[in-house]
Amino acid sequence: MTMPDVATRASAAMPSEDPSERPQRPLIRIGGVSKIYHNGTVALRDVDLAVAHGEFVSLLGPSGCGKSTLLRLIAGLGAVSDGTIDWPLSRYDVRGEPIRDLGFVFQDPTLMPWATVADNVYLPLKLAGIGRRAAAARIAEALAMVKLERFAGAYPRELSGGMKMRVSIARALVVKPRVLLMDEPFAALDEITRFRLNNDLLRLWQEQRWTVVFVTHSVFESVYLSNRIIVMSTRPGRIVGEVAIDAPYPRGDAFRTSRTYNEFCRLTSAELARAMAGTEEE
Amino acid sequence: MAEPQRGAAPRAMKLSTRVGVPVTVGIVFVVAWELLVRYLAVPRFVLPAPSMIATALIDDFLPLAGSLWVTLKVTLSAFAVALVLGVLIAILFAQSRLFEMSLFPYAVVLQVTPIVSIAPLVLIWVGLDHLERALLILATIVAFFPILSNTTLGLKSVDHNLQNLFDLYGATRWQRLKELQFPSALPYLLGGMRISGGLALIGAVVAEFVAGSGTGTGLAWRIVEAGNRLNIPRMFAALLLLSFLGILIFFTLSALEYLLLRRWHESAVGREN
C-alpha cells in the first residue's frame, strides 16, 4: 500500500471536517499512479485524480482502460507500482494505512450462496467482530435502504439479479461508509432494473452525502449519475479527459429525456471518441 | 419473489416411478432366480435359491449380525479417522502451498498403491498384537484420499471476488477459513465423503480377507469361512448383509449432503424450470 509521507500524516493528525476546506483538501488524492503487472502489462500510467468529499465521480472508458484497476487501488486491494494514493481527510492507523471507511460493490453481486440475505449483509460487521445482536439494527437499516426488508431470510439463489445487486449494495452500506466504490455494479442488469437502481442510488447518495466513485462503460449511465466524468483510454490505461455534468439534482426521468441530458451525452461521447482516436482497434 | 414452486404432480409421479420400477425389476429377478434354480435343480453348492439364502440369513442371524457389527465398527472408525485427517491435512494444504507441494505426491502414492499389497506389511507391523488396529489403518488408507483431494480442491475453489471482499474488510486467516473457505468446500467435502464411505467398507473387507483367520469375526471372514465349507447360502447371506451395509452408508451420506445443501447449493435444490 501507499505509505503517506510525513507531512501528509502530520496534517492528517488534525482532521478537519470544515466544508470550506474541501477545494484545497480532497478526500482522495491520486498522484502519478502507475500499475504494472508482473507480466509487464501497463494497466495504468501516471494517473492524477482528486476526488472531493460528497462528489459523484464516474470513471468511464472501454474495457481494458484500467478503470477497475484504479478503483481497486483506491480500495487498497493491491499495491501501486508507482505514485501515491492519499486520503488527506482520513486518519491513518498504526501501520500507516488510511482508515478508508469505504463500501465496495463489485460487478457481480458476489454473495455467499450458503448465507441468507441478512447474513450476507452482516458479513462486514461480523469480520469486524461485532456480534449478531448488536448488528441486527444496522442490518435491518441497510436492508431497508435498498427495500429488501422482507427478504432478510431468503437465500441468494431465490432472488432476481436486481435484488442480488441490492443485497450487495446493502452489504456495502452496512458499515456506514463515507465512500462508496462501485465497479460496474449494474452492467449485468436489464435496462429497466438498471434505471430503477440508478434512481435508488442517487436518492441514497443525496440522503447520506456519500462520496461515490463509480466505474462504468456506459456514457448514458455516467451522465445520468455523476457530477464529473473522468474519461479513460487504453494501452496504457490513462486519464484523457474530463466532463463536468453541471445539472442539478435530484435527477429523474425528466432529466433522462431532457435536451441538457442529450447534450451532455453527446459531449461525453465525443470526448470518449477523441480518447479512442489514437488507439488501434482491438 | 414467490416461494419456489416444487412442481408437485411431476415430482410425485417421479418418486413412485423411481422407487417402483427398480423394485419391480428386483422382484422379477428374484422370482425368476427361484423358479430357475428349482426347475433346473441346480445344486445348492453352486447356486442356492433365494429362499435358501433367506433361511440361512434367519438361521444364522445372530452370528452374522455379530460379524456385521464388527465390520461396521471398523468401517465407521476408519471413515471417521479418514474424515478428520483428510480435512485437517486439506486445511494445511490450503494454508501453505509449500506444504501441499511436498506432501501431496505421497498422498497419491498411498492412494494408487493397491491396498491388498500393503496389507500384509501393516498386518505384520501392527496386526500381530492389535488386529483391529491394523484393519482400521488399512481401511483408513483407502478411505482417506477422496476426502483429502476433494476438500483441498474445495478450499481452493473460492470465488475470487469474495476473496477480495474478505481482503477489503480485513478478515483474519481464521475468519477466512471459517466463513469463506470451509462453506465453499462443503459441497466438495460431502461429495468426497460419499465416495469415501463406500471405500471405507471396501477397505475393511479387503483388510479382513488378507488378515485371514486371526481373530477374524467380521463379515468378510464369514464369507471366506462359509466358502471353505461350501456353505454357499451362508456366503450369500453374508454378502447380502455387506451390500445392505454399503447401501445404508451411501444413503446416510446422501441424506446428510441433501440436508446440508438443500437451501443453497445447485446440486440439491429442486429445479423449477
Image (cartoon, coloured by chain):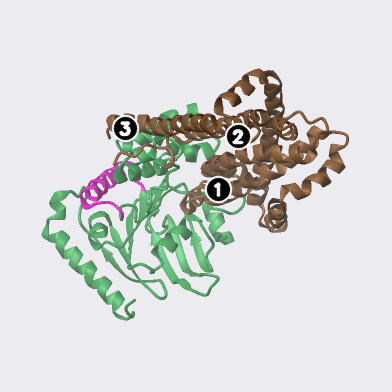
Chain colours: A green, B brown
Q: Secondary structure at mark 1?
A: helix
Of A139 and B124, the residue lying toward us: B124
For this orientation, the residue located farthest to the front is B40
Name the mark on residue B6.
Answer: 3
* Same subunit: marks 1 and 2: yes
- Residue type indicated by callout 3: Arg
Specify the quadrant that holds the N terminus of chain B: top left
- Residue A207 in magenta stretch: yes
Q: Is residue B9 left or right of residue A48?
A: left
| Rendering coords of residue A130 (x, y %) | 53, 33
Specify which label sits upstream in the sequence, 3 or 2: 3
Chain designation of label 2:
B
Specify the quadrant that holds the C terminus of chain B: top left
- Residue type indicated by callout 1: Gly
Specify which label sits upstream in the sequence, 1 or 3: 3
Name the mark on residue B47.
Answer: 2
Front position among marks 1 and 3: 3
Specify which label sits upstream in the sequence, 1 or 2: 2
**Circle 1 residues within 10 Å: few <14, some 14–19, many ≥20:** many
What residue is disc 1 on? B154
Residue at x-position 40% and y-position 65%: A49
